[in-house]
């Protein structure tokens, strides 16, 4: 399997985006962009080859080809795909992804993002860049064929549920029920992947949000506590001291003094 290494900490420069139509007059194209990445989301069946590596193309597949790579496209008739030609920068954490992936259920969301990017390209390049950047992050986090890459889907779903419900009551059974697994199974997966218990993760995320609100807003301490799902002020004070190392009032005062 061919792999590509990309870095996404800095937004890309989108040079072109559109819908490519191929396979009308020829069944084979050879393509190379000396300085730009190629991103394609496919609506057809065919094949893409890089050197000796051949990747089947199926509807919902997505490819990400590094600069200065010669690729051969093989068509079976009229073939349409979204394409983006972009420049990525050597900044941030490296992420290794397959050149070709099956986006599966994520392909619908990717198509929506790229459709917006294509529509915005002529009139609002920054909007097009934002849509493509979001698409790249989703592509980088697609699970691998062996499930080894990215977060475990149950852990990812649990973390998303926690983020959406921090202001309300949250228990491990509630999170497990929302994800669709047993309490004990989620507990094992969560600890293996994050090194934390679910309870510890919930507390950590609540206090990180509380810290942000204490430092960046004028909400009262009572309102901050309620906003992160800890309505009892004594419990909130205790949690702040344990997680942030200071009382809510001292956290806010330290931020004002800096």
Image (tube, rainbow, N blue to C red):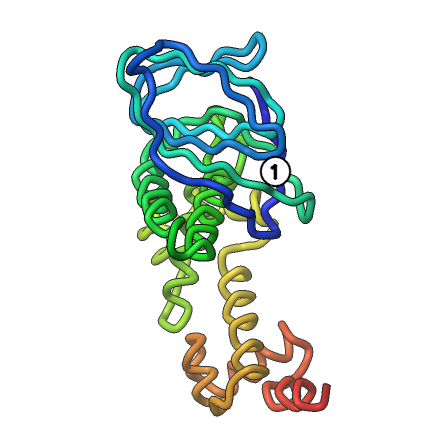
Residue 14 x, y percent position in the rendering = 50, 45
Residue matched to label 1: 6
Q: Is residue 57 left or right of residue 152?
A: left
On-image quarter of the N terminus? top right
- Is residue 189 in view from this perspective? no
Q: Nearer the viewer, residue 23 or 217?
A: 23
Q: Mark 1: which secondary structure?
A: strand
Q: Please name the residue shown 59% across and 25% down the image.
A: 3
Residue 249 in view (yes/no): yes
Residue depicted at x 61% and y 30%: 67
Q: Position of residue 18 (x, y in %)?
A: 37, 38
Q: Is residue 81 above or below residue 252?
A: above
* x then y, percent, for residue 34: 62, 28
Q: Is residue 56 above or below residue 179?
A: above
Please give the name of the residue rendered at 32% of the width and 15% of the height, measured from the top-left corner.
23
The spot of residue 205 in percent (x, y) is: 52, 65
At horizontal 47% and vertical 24% (from top left) the residue drawn is 100
Left or right? Give the position of 38 relative to 47: right
Quadrant assignment, res 135 = top left
């Amino acid at each position: 399997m061919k792999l590509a290494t990309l870095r996404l900490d800095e937004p890309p420069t989108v040079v072109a985006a559109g819908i490519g139509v191929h396979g009308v007059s020829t069944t084979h194209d050879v393509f190379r962009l000396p300085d730009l990445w190629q991103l394609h989301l496919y609506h057809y069946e065919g094949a893409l080859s890089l050197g000796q590596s051949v990747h089947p193309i199926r509807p919902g597949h997505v490819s990400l080809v590094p600069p200065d790579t010669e690729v051969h496209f093989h068509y079976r008739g009229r073939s349409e795909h979204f394409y983006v030609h972009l420049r990525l920068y050597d900044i941030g954490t490296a992420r290794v992804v397959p050149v070709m992936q099956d986006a599966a259920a994520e392909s619908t969301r990717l198509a929506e993002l790229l459709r917006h990017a294509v529509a915005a390209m002529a009139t609002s390049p920054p909007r097009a860049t934002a849509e493509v950047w979001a698409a790249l992050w989703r592509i980088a986090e697609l699970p691998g064929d062996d499930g080894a890459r990215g977060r475990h889907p149950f852990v990812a779903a649990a973390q998303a549920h926690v983020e959406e419900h921090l202001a309300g009551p949250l228990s491990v059974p509630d999170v497990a029920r929302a994800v669709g697994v047993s309490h004990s199974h989620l507990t094992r997966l969560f600890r293996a992947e994050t090194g934390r218990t679910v309870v510890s993760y919930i507390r950590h995320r609540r206090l990180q949000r509380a810290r942000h609100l204490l430092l960046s807003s004028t909400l009262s301490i009572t309102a901050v506590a309620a906003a992160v799902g800890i309505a009892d002020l004594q419990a909130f004070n205790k949690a702040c001291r344990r997680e942030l190392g200071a009382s809510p009032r001292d956290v806010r005062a330290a931020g004002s003094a800096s």
